[in-house]
Image (cartoon, rainbow, N blue to C red):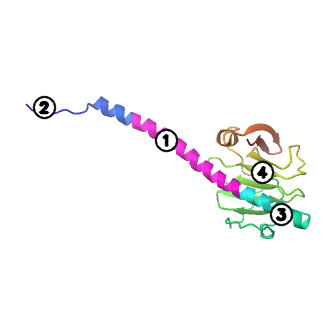
């Protein structure tokens, strides 16, 4: 005798539920990984620009106020007017991130997220002489607190959770996190 066997409705619902839970967890991790890779791309560009600023300073005795003066290729071509502190000398963007030379005597360079779930998060590199009461020549992860594009998540969602930064203090409109 041949007997048909199949799955019960309960068994099928349990399998669908398990697949749904696994998919939700995987999607969240995938989104975080994609965002982190975009941030690392901006961070790499930021470090290249900082190195070019140091070379320019050694040759000219002052920091560059334009990307055109630096010996570095910048693939980002969009110009934007997103201001970090109201004194941006030059800024370039790829639509998602903005890289800015700040109009300062100490050659500060900033990279900030313009869109997406971590909008307002970014990095600032403070060359020697930065007068905001933090260690000089250090890369900081930042989350904007007010003015312009504001970080819309709880403090530490970008810098602590994605880059293992440690909150140090708030300076002006930025929460500063020490990078590991």
Say if mark 3 contacts mark 4, CB within 8 Å. no
Picture residue at 92% right of the left edge, 64% below the top: 61
Q: What element carries label 1?
A: helix
Q: In this rendering, which labeled residue sits more in front, label 3 or label 2?
A: 3
| Dot 3 alpha-carbon crowd within 10 angstroms: few under 14, some 14 to 19, many 20 or more | some
Cα–Cα gap, marks 1 and 2: 39 Å
**Can you give x and y, in whole percent of width and height, for residue 150 in the image?**
72, 47
Q: Does the magenta stretch include residue 31?
A: yes
| Dot 1 alpha-carbon crowd within 10 angstroms: few under 14, some 14 to 19, many 20 or more | few
**Relative to 40, 141 lies left or right:** right
Q: Earlier in the sequence, mark 3 or mark 2?
A: 2
Q: Is residue 165 visible?
A: yes
Q: Is mark 3 on a helix, strand or loop?
A: helix
Label placed on residue 147: none
Name the image quarter holding residue 8.
Answer: top left
Label placed on residue 124: 4
- The residue to which callout 1 is attached is 26
- The residue to which callout 3 is attached is 55
Q: Earlier in the sequence, mark 3 or mark 4?
A: 3
Cα–Cα gap, marks 3 and 4: 18 Å
Say if mark 3 contacts mark 2, CB within 8 Å. no
């Amino acid at each position: 005798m041949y007997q048909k066997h199949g799955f019960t409705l309960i068994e099928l619902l349990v399998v669908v539920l398990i697949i749904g839970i696994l998919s939700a967890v995987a999607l969240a991790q995938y989104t975080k990984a994609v965002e982190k890779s975009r941030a690392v791309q901006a961070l790499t560009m930021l470090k290249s620009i900082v190195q070019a600023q140091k070379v320019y300073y050694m040759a000219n005795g002052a920091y560059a106020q334009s990307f055109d003066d630096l010996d570095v290729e910048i693939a980002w071509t969009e110009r934007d007017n997103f201001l970090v502190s109201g004194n941006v000398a030059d800024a370039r963007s790829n639509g998602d991130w903005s890289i800015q030379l700040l109009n300062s005597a100490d050659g500060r360079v900033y990279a900030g997220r313009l869109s997406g779930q971590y909008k307002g998060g970014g990095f600032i590199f403070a060359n020697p002489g930065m007068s905001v009461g933090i260690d000089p020549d250090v890369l900081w992860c930042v989350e904007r607190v007010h003015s312009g594009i504001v970080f819309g998540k709880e403090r530490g969602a970008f810098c602590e959770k994605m880059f293992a930064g440690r909150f140090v203090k708030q300076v002006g409109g930025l929460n500063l996190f020490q990078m590991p």
